Amino acid sequence: MIKKIIIIGPAFPLRGGIANFNNALAQAFHCRGDNVIIYSFSLQYPGFLFPGTSQFEGGNKPANLNIKTVINSVNPFNWIRIVKKINKENPDFVIIRYWLPFLAPCLGTIAYFLNKKIKILAITDNIYPHEKRIGDSFLTKYFLNSCDAFITLSSSVLDDLSCFIDTKLKKFLPHPIYDIFGKKISKKEARNSLSLNLDDRYLLFFGFVRDYKGLDLILRAISDSRVRSLGVKLIIAGEFYNNKKKYIDLINELNIKDYVIINDNFISNEDVKYYFCAADMITQTYHSATQSGVTQIAYSLERPMLVTNVGGLAEIVPDRKVGYVTSKNPINIADAIIDFYSNEAEDSFVLNIKKEKKRFSWNYFLRGIDELMNLVKK
């Protein structure tokens, strides 16, 4: 049976992992034959609150997607207009992405005033934000109380959700694999494209650089004399959303300038595969985490991973099967890097990744949504 579905959240031309997810989710519904519309933001963050150079990406709109760029996150009059538009569409259900308390007044108000016959599903990336502020819990509760059912992308966030709302209409579904970054290419082709030495050893730290993502931990691991003796270099690819200078100072303090390559620009979707396929292993040495789209890009492009044992990362990356799960101690991180190269683990990890990635399909994710929404009685 064809469904009419509305997704509320960032989408093209807004950039970032959540926008990529929403684009891919809408595409999955479309491929199944559903009628899906994304209501995205005309204003997501006021400029003074946004740490990057731009909230937008270039290129062409993803094919087959109906994206309405209409929501103003700080204008209550706009929220009421959006409610009227969505009620007129009369969808079977609405999916709202929630990841930041700043957006709770906007998203919670829209959800509250929708026609009471419309089922509302929240996909909650985070319950507790990575960078906490006064009032976060009040705002999050305001949003959650306006929704009927909930999906989390990690079991740790499912536990956090239980601290705010008592409901059985909740489910953990792992983040599906992205298929929007193209096919895997050879390491030789990727390195040639990035003008990297074909014979060197490279690790990748990818995405917006924020303090909670633990760039400092992998830099300290790279400074380990045992790692340096292997000639391992770290590629940092992504914009710095926190103080870049302190990381440059740390690189100089650790005397590892010759072992670090920095591209602090936004990496377009078309270029992502070159960075992943050029690397021997993808590193996510987070201080704190819920889940991360970076792991799913690594699965898609079949790259081994090194993650710290925080949030939901360990449940997505089986230790010593598709990569390593370590503590946040830089010595333990260095131990994993040394094990990876000393035991030539890349080929066996890649074989396991090809098997493991099958459990992260979009069809599985859609079935999970259907099962949960069938339980919502209106």
Image (cartoon, grey):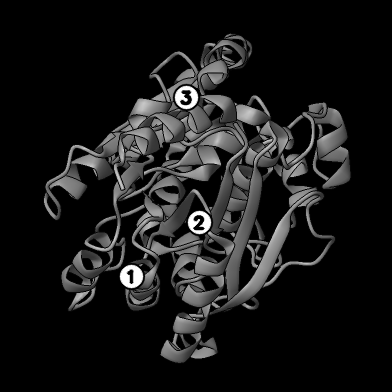
Report which residue position mark 2 lands on.
255
Q: What residue type is labelled 1?
A: Gly
Residue 27, visible in the rendered structure: yes
Q: In this view, does 329 lie to the left or right of 36?
A: left
Report which residue position mark 1 lands on.
108
Residue 300: which quarter of the image? top right
Q: What residue type is labelled 2?
A: Asn
Query: At 81% across and 38% down in the image, what residue appears?
Result: 191
Residue at disc 2, secondary structure: loop
Query: In front here: 228 or 296?
Result: 296
* Residue at mark 2 to residue at mark 1: CA–CA distance: 49 Å
Badge 2: few (under 14), some or many (20 or more) residues near its Cα, within 10 Å? few
> Given this view, does label 3 or label 2 mark the residue nearer the observer?
3
Q: Which amino acid does label 3 sit on?
A: Ile
* Residue at mark 3 to residue at mark 2: CA–CA distance: 19 Å
Q: Is residue 34 left or right of residue 336?
A: right
Query: In front here: 350 or 130?
Result: 130
Report which residue position mark 3 lands on.
338
Looking at the rendered image, the quarter that the N terminus falls into is top right
Query: Closer to the N terminus: mark 3 or mark 2?
Result: 2
